[in-house]
């Protein structure tokens, strides 16, 4: 038998921290007086004029019924000045205890005050300036220097007392949020100006000044009024006042939300389902709602009514941690990302088919809402739902739109409107609606029950759970499953886009044509996601495929093309191509500066500058992130990596130690410090740092791999195998872990284990020549 020892090298790679634009979630002085349109007899419009916001009261002159419906709605009450008519909470000396810190709510004349722990952790008195939201909870906003408004973490439960309401409660009851935490009510993640403002007021202008780190946030109306959805109305008002003039396009409206005009839904007697009287021509209405009712990143200062959503925002795909792999909501998604997965959306249903867009009330109660399009005789019967009439299980929404609770008391129905799939619970562990009620029964029981029902297709419209699950976990055949989903034109775009994006982790000559098709799609979401996958492609491939998309008509696609091309060596480009990228990079910088008040944006810029080789600009961006958010440790870690590239490890070490002081539980900082100390040949302390990274983040396969290799290289092979085995139990399909296990097991003399791991690798990557070489290089038993 061969007894040559297999060698695996220690990969000294600093893993850059992945950053993303913060999802928006509460301003400052306003509101301005509504701008009254000048009287005119004839409609005129300058070719360069921009429509202006006129105010809801102007709209009410012609649209009184709609305005009256809006009054008192959640949009009307989205934000209000704090006074005796708007504050719902108990300010009569009520106290609330949170981990031993007592807050007190009280009044002084017309002022509403709270005594609670402030930015220094000490008790202080703060005045409530605005109320935020109304039901099922209301938050209160406190004004701080620099134009900041901060949302209290103690909220008022505005539900009736009989439902558990009329009480103060904390939004984070299960974790002690202290003043140094970004989630503390005084912290950056509870800042109204960035996190919430643009979805609770109309014509919101953040007006952030980076130099002084201050805001002068303004709005045209304090709440969500008519023009938040319909766009600035000055041109429409001009048309309405010029009674004898010819009508301008769309009667002067910025966006025509007339997709339902003249449309009816007619129930087919055979199927019991409704058919739209004419196909829907677009999704402008849903996109308008999505500007706030979506999990998204902001890329433009103003929302462009009527244009592609991706000209203003990048919506979240079916990301791990936000959605389960079958697309069910996990974290709060604000409805859009769920709804566009639904069969209803793809049949032409819009938000206002179910919701009155002005009052926000449902158009019918209970099962009658679904009965608008689904025959009650066929669907609202035990023959269909197999539950006793009138029971919880007979509710359409309970089975097809199960609720998930957010902010402790705010139940959100899943708008993907899906058929329950307990069989997928058995296969890949996703939740199912049956288990919400039948808590004492197993998913196997529920799957068996459903399979025995007399009729119906119990697979449903969303048939991509196993493909996306395989992509997340690295299961065998993941690449092929993702390719099939990406090419399935009958699947929701958001699922196809997720598959295209996830293909980046499996990119090969087999899947590259799938990405090329995605890049040529008419759907900007598919183009943007295909570009995402190209990050993993060789520079020459990125240049060939991504360069044309620098001229894409949609902003979000152009920005992603810039990111993909930033790391391509300029020596590979012609002068004209370098100019194209330079122009695109200017647009990229402008987009990031939309959120200049967030450290993530400056880290994004730093990463891009590093890719371009502009290290001085990268350093400046990282330091800006640290200045505006001193507790944001990814900026420290990335700047330390920049210093590594410049041979300035001594400075980088100080940054990483400071990051650990700021956030002792930060695994990324420990891992980066461990790699730096290895470069400095301080092996004992390096091993401690690498080990601490694994202790803090045991699910991070990369950290486990690097630590195990380091253990093996420093003469501790048994410990290395233990680390790898634990990592394998958490990440059974991770190729690096399996490869190291095969090599280390062989070196320890356990050839049976080595072959077992190598065989598993071959199952996962049957066409990988490196795996075949491993199999061939493994020592044989000699039998």
Image (cartoon, grey):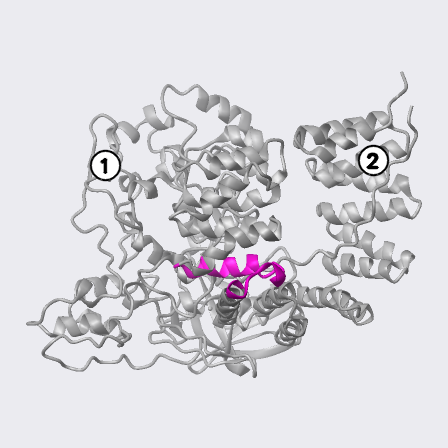
Task: Give the main secondary structure, helix, strand or loop, of the magenta stretch.
Answer: helix
Q: Dot 1, how many residues are within 10 Å of its Cα: few (below 14), some (14-19), or many (20+)?
A: some
In the image, 248 versus 236, the foreground residue is 248
Q: Residues within 10 Å of mark 2 (few under 14, many from 20)?
A: many
Q: What secondary structure is found at the residue carrying circle 1?
A: strand
Query: Is 367 situated above or below 255?
Result: above
**Vertical relation: 279 (above or below) 300:** above
The percent coordinates of residue 704 (x first, y second) are 77, 46
Question: Residue 94: percent from the left, percent from the top?
Answer: 52, 69
Residue 197: name its quadrant.
Answer: bottom left
To which residue does mark 1 refer?
Answer: 275
In this orientation, which residue lies closer to the viewer: 440 or 256?
Answer: 256
Residue at position x 79%, y 40% in the image: 724
Secondary structure under tag 2 reads: helix
The residue at the point 79 percent across, 39 percent down is 740
Magenta residue check for 572? yes
Labels 1 & 2 near each other (Cβ < 8 A): no
User: Is residue 213 magenta-colored?
Assistant: no
Res 170 seen here: no
Residue reaching furthest to the front: 574
Question: Can you identify the residue that label 2 sits on?
Answer: 743
Location of the C terminus (image quadrant)? top right
Whether residue 706 sits left or right of residue 230 in the image: it is right
Locate the N terminus and report the quarter of the image it occupies: top right
Q: CA distance from mark 1 to mark 2?
A: 60 Å
- N-term-proximal mark, 1 vs 2: 1
Q: What percent of the width, then of the height, locates residue 767?
A: 66, 31
Tally the marks: 2
Mark whose residue sits in front, 1 or 2: 2
Give, as a single range, the part of the protein colored magenta.
553-577
144 sits left or right of 395 in the view = right
Q: Nearer the viewer, residue 264 or 501?
A: 501
């Amino acid at each position: 038998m061969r007894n040559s020892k297999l060698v695996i090298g220690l990969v000294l790679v600093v893993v850059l921290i992945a950053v993303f634009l913060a999802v928006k979630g509460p301003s400052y002085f306003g509101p301005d007086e509504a701008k009254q349109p000048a009287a005119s007899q004839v409609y005129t419009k300058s070719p360069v004029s921009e429509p202006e916001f006129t105010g809801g009261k102007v709209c009410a002159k012609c649209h009184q019924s709609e305005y009256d419906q809006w009054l008192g709605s959640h949009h009307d009450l989205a934000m209000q000045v704090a006074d005796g008519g708007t504050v719902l909470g108990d300010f009569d000396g009520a106290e609330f205890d949170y981990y031993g810190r007592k807050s007190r709510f009280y009044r002084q004349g017309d002022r509403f005050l709270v005594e609670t722990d402030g930015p220094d952790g000490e008790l202080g008195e703060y005045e409530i300036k605005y109320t935020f939201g109304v039901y099922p909870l209301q938050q209160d906003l406190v004004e701080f220097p620099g134009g900041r408004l901060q949302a209290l973490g103690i909220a008022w439960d505005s539900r009736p007392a009989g439902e558990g309401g009329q009480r103060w409660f904390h939004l984070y009851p299960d974790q002690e949020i202290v003043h140094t935490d970004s989630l503390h009510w005084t912290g950056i993640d509870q800042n109204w100006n960035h996190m919430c403002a643009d979805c609770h007021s109309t014509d919101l202008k953040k007006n952030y000044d980076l130099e002084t780190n201050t805001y002068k946030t303004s709005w045209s109306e304090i709440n969500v009024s008519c023009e938040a959805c319909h766009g600035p109305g000055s041109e429409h008002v001009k048309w309405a006042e010029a009674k004898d003039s010819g009508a301008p396009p769309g009667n002067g409206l910025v966006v025509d939300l007339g997709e339902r005009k003249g449309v009816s839904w007619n129930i087919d007697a055979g199927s019991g389902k409704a058919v739209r009287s004419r196909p829907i021509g677009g999704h402008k209405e849903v996109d308008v709602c999505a500007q706030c009712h979506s999990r998204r990143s902001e890329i433009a200062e103003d929302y462009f009514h009527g244009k592609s959503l991706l000209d203003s925002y990048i919506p979240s795909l079916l990301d791990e941690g936000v959605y389960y792999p079958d697309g069910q909501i996990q974290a709060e998604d604000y409805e859009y990302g769920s709804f566009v997965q639904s069969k209803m959306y793809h049949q032409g249903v819009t938000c206002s088919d179910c919701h009155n867009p002005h009052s926000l009330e449902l158009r019918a109660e209970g099962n009658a809402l679904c009965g608008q399009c689904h025959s009650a005789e066929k669907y609202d019967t035990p023959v269909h739902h197999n539950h006793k009439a009138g029971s919880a299980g007979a509710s359409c929404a309970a089975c097809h739109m199960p609720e998930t609770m957010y902010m402790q008391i705010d139940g959100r129905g899943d708008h993907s409107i899906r058929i329950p799939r307990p069989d997928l619970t058995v296969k890949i562990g996703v939740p199912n609606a049956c288990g919400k009620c039948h808590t004492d029964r197993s998913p196997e029981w529920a799957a068996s029950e459903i399979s025995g029902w007399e009729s119906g297709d119990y697979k449903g419209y969303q048939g991509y759970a196993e493909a996306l699950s395989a992509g997340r976990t690295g299961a065998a055949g993941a690449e092929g499953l993702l390719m099939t989903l990406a090419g399935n034109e009958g699947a929701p775009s958001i699922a196809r886009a997720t598959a295209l994006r996830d293909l980046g982790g499996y990119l090969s000559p087999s899947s590259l044509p799938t990405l090329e098709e995605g890049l040529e799609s008419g759907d900007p979401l598919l183009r943007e996601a295909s570009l995402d996958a190209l990050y993993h492609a060789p520079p020459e491939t990125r240049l060939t495929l991504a360069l044309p998309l620098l001229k894409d008509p949609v902003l979000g696609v152009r920005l992603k093309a810039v990111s993909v091309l930033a790391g391509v060596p300029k020596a590979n480009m012609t002068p004209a191509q370098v100019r194209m990228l330079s122009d695109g990079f200017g647009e990229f910088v402008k987009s990031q500066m939309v959120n200049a008040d967030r450290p993530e944006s400056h880290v994004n810029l730093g990463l891009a500058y590093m890719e371009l080789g502009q290290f001085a600009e990268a350093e400046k961006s990282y330091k800006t992130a640290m200045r505006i958010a001193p507790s944001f440790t990814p900026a420290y870690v990335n700047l330390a990596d920049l210093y590594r590239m410049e041979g300035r490890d001594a400075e980088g070490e100080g940054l990483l130690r400071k990051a650990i002081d700021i956030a002792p539980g930060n695994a990324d900082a420990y891992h980066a410090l461990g790699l730096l100390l290895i470069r400095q040949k301080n092996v004992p302390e390096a091993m401690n740092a690498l080990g601490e990274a694994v202790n803090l983040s045991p699910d991070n396969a990369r950290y486990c791999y690097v630590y195990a290799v380091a253990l093996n290289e420093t003469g501790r092979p048994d410990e290395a195998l233990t680390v790898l085995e634990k990592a394998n139990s958490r990440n059974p399909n991770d190729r690096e872990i399996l490869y190291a296990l095969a090599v280390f097991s062989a070196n320890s003399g356990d050839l049976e284990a080595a072959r077992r791991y190598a065989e598993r690798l071959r199952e996962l990557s049957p066409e990988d020549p490196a795996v075949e070489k491993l199999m061939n290089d493994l020592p044989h038993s000699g039998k």
